Image: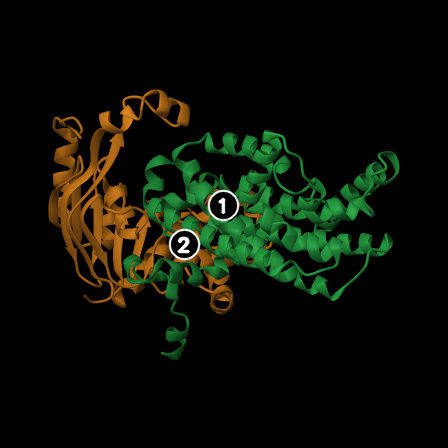
Chain colours: A green, B orange
């Protein structure tokens, strides 16, 4: 009898009995397993396997270092580090969103046949990209050592910064994955918007580097940057990695707030629309 | 309600049939979302009421498109009814199709754990079941092979082996006994009879009268989304044959 009790899955109780959040938490093992599946399938049959996640950004870094440091002669010291501290979190965000928004469609066979909280699919895409992102920080640290970048205690803030960014990314991915079910062109639209957003976010530049100009378009640009949520999320990594300092308290506060808000919006909208997905798949 | 009890009250599932399929934003904007208003409502299932007691075995019978799969999906919780209510008490083995959650690229071993997680079991719980599942499936030699290399019979065997070990209160089986060789089919039937003996509610969809008569004393016959008959299997099957022969009215389409 004790064995029976132990093997009772909390998740297989009737649908309406538990809260939506509790349901996702009960399925966290499934999310973990889907993350492992994604990574396993992605690196299957490749000789280097998971090493690619580290090799990939490393090769990218070598290219950027050569281009910016020697050919273009950037005025910034260690411009490669500056760039990568913005580019790696950006790549995590944009790849997770783009991959995640089709996750309901790619798992539709399953959704039609097995009762499972559908949010596990976009969330597992964020999870697998989070693993890749975390692994890509290893070669970044190696490069920092190689270029004699300062290592400060502020680097300890990185896990917190990554966590806040992951929460925000999860919210966006949930929201866009449910929209994509109803309108397939959300995907193409998002591709274009992300391309634009890359240049309208502090990835290749920094707010401090912009300086002041009085033209109207420049002021509009600055206003957009101030409203862009990524302007507060990207410094969470760049500040400790490149500037060797903790991000300022207002930045951390705003970033945490927008991450929590985004996740709440994404989750509520997803939860509302999910029962209707099956009619549109 | 007791565990294993199913209560269906005036349940209906409707689909919107769009005259024009609109799936891009541009089309929707150009039409000013007219498609949302002009859609016709198709009832795949309507006014169905059924009470299934814990431990009962019921066969859902009907021609293709009669709504039996839709009914099964609402019982499994994959689909919410558009009207009425469907209450299922206890743990459902919510597999509309055995092996539905399998990933062909992964090994049989990985798929057992993945499938277990889909059913809400932890890795630890599945480790306790693993050996029994492999033994039941008789696939020990192939368990580390990617299942895309499995035959369809092996696929179904692994699927059934997992579904039979999740200790359900309600077991839903949809046409799966048609796959696999005769010996394994017999093994599955024996396992289902064991379940019945322990009071597991059993919902079965089959086009084969022998399998249905063998396993289920009761039948619910669906016809164009309505419940046409509910009673003993022998009469139920007669009714089904009759409906299949007779002139069938077109599907119910009502303006919405």
> Could you tell me if residue B57 is visible in this image?
yes
Residue B199 occupies quadrant: bottom left
Residue B126 in percent (x, y) is at: 48, 65
> Could you tell me if residue B139 is visible in this image?
no
From mark 2 to mark 1, how far is it between C-alphas? 34 Å
| Badge 2 and badge 1 both on one subunit | no
Residue A13 in percent (x, y) is at: 32, 63
**Which circle, 2 or 1, is nearer the viewer?**
1
Residue B73 in percent (x, y) is at: 29, 46
Of all chains, the one bearing label 2 is: B
Instruction: Please state if A33 lies on the left or on the right of A110 as rendered.
Output: right
Judging by the rendered image, the residue that carries numbered circle 1 is: A173
Of all chains, the one bearing label 1 is: A
Instruction: Please state if A19 lies on the left or on the right of A166 as rendered.
Output: left
Judging by the rendered image, the residue that carries numbered circle 2 is: B160
* Front residue (pair B115, A270): A270
Residue pictured at 13% horizontal, 40% vertical: B238
| Quadrant placement of the C terminus of chain A | top left
* Front residue (pair B25, B156): B25
């Amino acid at each position: 009898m004790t064995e029976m009790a132990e093997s009772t899955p909390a998740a297989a109780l009737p649908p309406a009995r538990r809260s939506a959040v509790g349901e996702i938490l009960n399925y966290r093992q499934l999310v973990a397993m889907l993350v492992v599946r994604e990574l396993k399938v992605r690196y299957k049959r490749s000789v280097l396997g998971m090493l690619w996640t580290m090799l990939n950004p490393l090769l990218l870094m070598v290219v950027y270092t050569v281009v910016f440091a020697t050919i273009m002669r950037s005025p910034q010291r260690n411009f490669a580090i500056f760039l990568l501290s913005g580019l790696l979190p950006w790549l995590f965000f944009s790849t997770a969103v783009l991959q995640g928004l089709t996750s309901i469609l790619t798992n539709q066979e399953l959704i039609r046949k097995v009762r499972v909280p559908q949010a596990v699919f976009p969330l597992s895409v964020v999870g697998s990209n989070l693993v890749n992102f975390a692994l890509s920080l290893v070669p970044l640290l190696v490069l920092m050592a190689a270029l004699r970048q300062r290592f400060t205690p502020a680097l300890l803030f990185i896990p917190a910064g990554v966590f806040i960014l992951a929460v925000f990314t999860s919210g966006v991915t949930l929201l866009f994955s449910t929209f994509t079910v109803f309108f397939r062109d959300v995907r193409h639209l998002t591709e274009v918007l992300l391309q634009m957003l890359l240049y309208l976010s502090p990835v290749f530049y920094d707010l401090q580097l912009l300086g002041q100009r009085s033209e109207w378009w420049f002021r509009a640009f600055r206003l957009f940057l101030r409203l862009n949520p990524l302007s507060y999320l990207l410094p969470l990594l760049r500040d400790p990695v490149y500037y060797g300092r903790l991000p300022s308290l207002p930045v951390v506060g705003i970033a945490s707030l927008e991450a929590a808000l985004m996740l709440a919006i994404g989750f509520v909208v997803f939860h509302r629309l999910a029962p209707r997905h099956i009619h549109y798949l | 309600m007791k565990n294993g009890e199913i209560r269906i009250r005036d349940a209906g599932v409707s689909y919107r049939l769009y005259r024009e399929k609109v799936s891009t934003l541009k089309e929707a904007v150009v039409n000013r979302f007219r498609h949302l208003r002009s859609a016709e409502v198709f009832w795949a299932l309507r006014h169905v009421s059924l009470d299934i007691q814990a431990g009962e075995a019921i066969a859902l019978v009907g021609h293709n498109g009669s709504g039996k799969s839709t009914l099964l999906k609402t019982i499994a919780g994959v689909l919410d009814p558009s009207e009425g209510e469907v209450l299922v008490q206890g743990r459902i083995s919510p597999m509309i199709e055995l092996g539905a959650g399998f990933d062909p690229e992964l090994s049989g071993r990985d798929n057992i754990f993945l499938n277990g997680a889909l059913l809400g079991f932890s890795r630890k719980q599945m480790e306790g079941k693993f050996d029994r599942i492999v033994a039941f499936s008789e696939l020990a030699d192939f368990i580390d092979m990617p299942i895309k290399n499995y035959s369809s019979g092996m696929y179904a065997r692994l699927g059934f082996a997992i579904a039979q070990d999740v200790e359900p209160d309600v077991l839903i089986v949809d046409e799966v006994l048609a796959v696999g060789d005769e010996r394994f089919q017999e093994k599955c039937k024996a396992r289902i009879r064991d379940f019945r003996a322990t009071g597991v509610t059993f919902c079965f969809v089959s086009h084969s009268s022998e399998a249905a008569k063998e396993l289920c004393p009761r039948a619910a016959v669906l016809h164009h989304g309505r419940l046409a008959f509910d009673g003993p299997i022998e009469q139920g099957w007669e009714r089904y044959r009759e409906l299949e022969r007779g002139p069938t009215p077109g599907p119910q389409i009502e303006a919405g």
